[in-house]
Amino acid sequence: MFPHTITIYHHSVVNGADVYDMTVLSGCYWMRTASRAGAGKGAEKTDSYTVVFSPEQTAKYGTVWKVYPGDRVVRGVKSGATVGKCASGAVLVGHTSIKSWKELTGDVMVVKAVEENICGSSVDNITLIC
């Protein structure tokens, strides 16, 4: 039910230097909604992405991993990641070798919102809107 793996990139400034941390998470579901909207004399692509995390990953949210609006999300294990195979439910956190957002490749999505649906039930989840 949660077959996908994603890499989350977070930017911060430490002692005046740019630092990019990454978190690789398996146990999520990546969904794309493709649409087009009229714009001027043509059509504009207005795709959106939603990532829903399994209850197992949700239980680790805030203590083992965290995501913020403005972070970047890439499907799979991507740029700068030097990790082995990410087993189901695994969380791998570390620094990445990237120096700029421009180095990320593939479908790079910017996190617009983080929905925390946590109430102590078996269907608790974290949902990212990108």
Image (cartoon, helix red, strand yellow):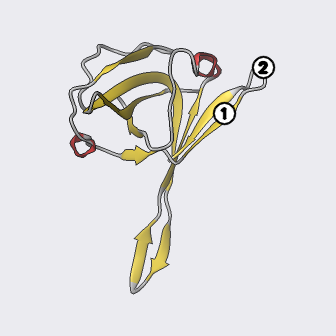
Q: Secondary structure at mark 2?
A: loop
Please count the marks in the image.
Answer: 2
Q: Position of residue 40 (x, y in %)?
A: 42, 85
Instruction: Sort mark 1 into few (<14), some (14-19) or many (20+) by Cα contacts within 10 Å.
Output: few
Q: Position of residue 89 (x, y in %)?
A: 51, 15
Q: Secondary structure at mark 1?
A: strand
Q: Position of residue 115 (x, y in %)?
A: 64, 38
Residue drawn 39% across the image and 86% down it: 41
Residue drawn 28% across the image and 27% down it: 15
Residue drawn 29% across the image and 29% down it: 19
Q: Nearer the viewer, residue 73 or 18?
A: 18
- Circle number at residue 120: 2
Q: Quadrant of the N terminus?
A: top right
Q: Amino acid at mark 1?
A: Glu
Cα–Cα span, label 2 and label 1? 12 Å
Q: Amino acid at mark 2?
A: Gly
Dividing the picture into quarters, in which one does residue 2 lie?
top right
Q: Position of residue 114 (x, y in %)?
A: 59, 39
